Amino acid sequence: MRVTKRESATDKVSDEGTEKTAKDDAVHLRRSIGLLPSISFIIGTVVGSGIFIAPKGVLINSGSVGLSLLVWTLCGVLSTFGALCYAELGTSFRKSGGHYTYLLETLGPLPAFLRLWTEFIFIRPAVATYVSLAFGQYVVEPLFMPCAAPTVLVKLVSMLGVTFVVAVNCWSVTMAARTQVLLTFIKMFALILIIIPGIIALVNGKTENFQNAFVSDSLSLSKLPLAFYSGLYAYGGWFYLNFITEEVINPNRTIPLAITLSMVTVTVFYVLVNVAYYTMMTANELLMSDAVAVTFASRALQGVAPAIPVLVALSCLGALNGGFFSSPRMLFVGAREGHLPGIFSMIHIHRQTPLPAVLCLYPLVIIMMVRGEIFQLINFASFSRWLFIALATLGMIIHRYRFPDHPRPFKVPLAVAVIFTIVCFFIVGLSLYSDPWNTGGSCALTLSGVPVYYLTIKKSYIPERWKKAFNYLSLHVQIFLEVAQQEVQTY
């Protein structure tokens, strides 16, 4: 039978259409995050509770108004340097997973596993707890002013906020992305609402709080790393887009552009917000406030002051949403590489969300929320977070030397990578002296992953009976959650 060219072409189109349909129906993470959601994702994750709570931590440890503003500026520059390094890493390695993936590709499996271990055990729960408590504090405190809000009620509201975010991220990737865009616009409006009256007052001559700005009786070199920790925490989140690389449309263009635009915007806004704070409040007044933005609004925005706590709470909710959107992807990739149980590398067959990875973090956050002082949580989580960021950028420099021909669509200047890496190691090292209790505990928990790696991953000394029991349990969890392994390679 003779087949005409027209029939052959028709069959080819039909086969391509069938293949495309099959791929669309397959279980896998979709590339659905464009430039605007990417920018919203970074800004929305960076601008959370930090800018409304961290000014107190920065001022306590820097000792003066002028030095605290300098710390905020340097933290912005340093975070931008780090973000540019991660733009190179994100375009060089097309897998999701962020820190974990880059450590795995450049320094090997042990550092990568330790990063995964610390993320699962305490970094993500501590960070999410910090943001959740800030959310609860800003929701509840205005109802009880001038009295202190009941701690139990603050934690209860915080738990409700976490529950809402987890539910959204389990339900739909699209819904989580749209929620992030909406909350980002709301939080930028909140920052503008703070900046404008502060700048107007400054222009009108209200500069008394900036006189002798660098004079301080409490300046201590040992405390400066803690000031940077608070500032860098407020800028934290610039690396989260790298956690979802496999879901970003045209990552070679989108990742560097989104990171650059986002970090420049955030740095300018953060410095201006702090200038506005100090224009309307003295240093002592800021230190006495547990909710800086609320105190600011009661002075500068009396007409709309009740709206500020609501806007700040929504800002915290946006940061929480961004964290729960991204961090489970690290667990997802780690399980896919065999460093976590396989159940965490599974996706819901209908909703296309990494359901088990999202859900596993939820109880850890609730447990940590029951007990934990807010600034201790920052110092506790920051040591390991910044240690592994420094290792990732060090790995990038080593990888450049070892594999000079590896494709790098975006390449950051070497000086930027070296400066960022050295400063990170310096801050991490000095923090062990500044706050030995929290940072030492963080270091110990990080190193506790070494025997876990060699016993369960490297040598697999797990008894056969335990393996069978775990596999049996995993199978029933898989059936109950309606999840399956990814059917399409997305990197």
Image (tube, rainbow, N blue to C red):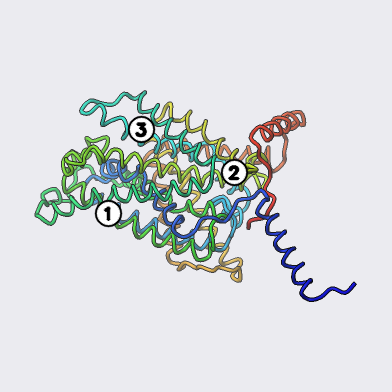
Image position of 193 (left or right of 238)? left
Judge by depth and name the residue closer to the eye, 245 or 40. Answer: 40
Q: Residue at x 44, y 46 (%)?
A: 179
Foreground label between 2 and 3? 2
**Which callout, 2 or 1, points at the residue further toward the start of the chain?**
1
Which residue has dot 1 on it?
271
Q: Amino acid at mark 1?
A: Val
What is the spatial separation of the Cα atoms under label 2 and label 3, in whole angstroms?
Answer: 29 Å
Residue 136 - label: 3
Residue 384 - label: none
Q: Amino acid at mark 3?
A: Gly
Foreground label between 1 and 3? 3
Q: Secondary structure at mark 2?
A: loop
**Which callout, 2 or 3, points at the residue further toward the start of the chain?**
3
Does residue 32 lie above or below 327 as drawn?
Answer: below
Q: Residue at x 38, y 33 (%)?
A: 133
Question: What crowding class fits label 3: few (fewer than 14 Cα within 10 Å), some (14-19), or many (20 or more)?
Answer: many
